[in-house]
Image: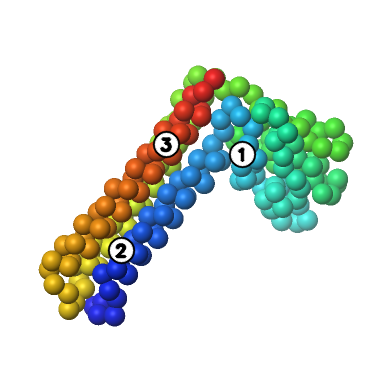
Amino acid sequence: MTTGTSLQDHSKNAKQLMDKAVDAVKREFSTVRTGRATTALLDLVKVEAYGSEMPLNQVGTVAAPEPKLLTVQPWDKSLLKAVEKAILASDLGLTPANDGNIIRIPIPSLTEERRKDLVKVIHKFAEEGRVAIRHARTEAISRIKKTEHVSEDEKKHAEKDVQKLHDDHLKLVDAAVKTKEAEIMEV
């Protein structure tokens, strides 16, 4: 089946897929709210503007001037109400305050219960990442097994490489989980 593809190609392909999985997990983590203000928090907020839904960062400047405060400065003042409405509608549990020029969003401290819920959420994201990494490994190993004109020893060696990639990437996900969990549980 794969005469034109070398064992290295299978490993390289698997590594790319695993890298993407780790990046996706880290990106998902950045949208999970901790007690600290971060502009990534509002990345998934969509604003009703100019007849369509637009990401918040495409209608204004999002900033974190203080550890417990986010600000949104819409480029078009007529969108202030729409931005405010979009933030309220998001399930982030944030209450924006509009002063006619800028929207201030205080970041409330998290309750113990909310922290535990957020930890569950990051574990779910992490598991999705682990599944993607395992899938990339399984796929690569099955391709390696089907590679023609290669000795069994070379195939075994390539499989070991893919397994090592798999293990290393799982460690990256686990490290990201530990970091994010510590950030969430920090009072």
> In the rendering, at what x and y percent does residue 12 appear?
35, 64
Query: Image quarter for residue 67?
Result: top right
Closer to the eye: label 2 or 3: 2
x, y (%) of residue 114? 52, 24
For marks 2 and 3, give the CA distance. 25 Å
Tell me the residue that label 1 is attached to.
41
- In this view of the protein, can residue 158 be seen by the observer? yes
Horizontal side of 114 relative to 158 (left or right) equals right
Alpha-carbon span between mark 1 and mark 2: 35 Å
On the image, the x and y values in percent for residue 37 come to 64, 32
Q: Nearer the viewer, mark 1 or mark 2?
A: 2
For marks 3 and 1, the one nearer the N-term is 1
Relative to 168, is 105 above or below?
above
The residue to which callout 2 is attached is 11
What amino acid does circle 2 point to?
Ser
Does the rendering let one see residue 131? no
Q: Residue at x 76, y 32 (%)?
A: 104
Q: Classify mark 3: residues with Cα within 10 Å, few (<14), some (14-19) or many (20+).
A: many
Residue 86: image quadrant is top right
Judge the density around disc 2: few (<14), some (14-19), many (≥20) Cα neighbours within 10 Å. many
| Amino acid identity at mark 3 | Val
**Total labels drawn:** 3
Which dot marks residue 177?
3
The amino acid at mark 1 is: Leu
Query: Tag 3, which secondary structure?
Result: helix
- Label 1 Cα crowd, 10 Å radius (few <14 / some 14-19 / many 20+): some
SS of the residue at dot 2?
Answer: helix
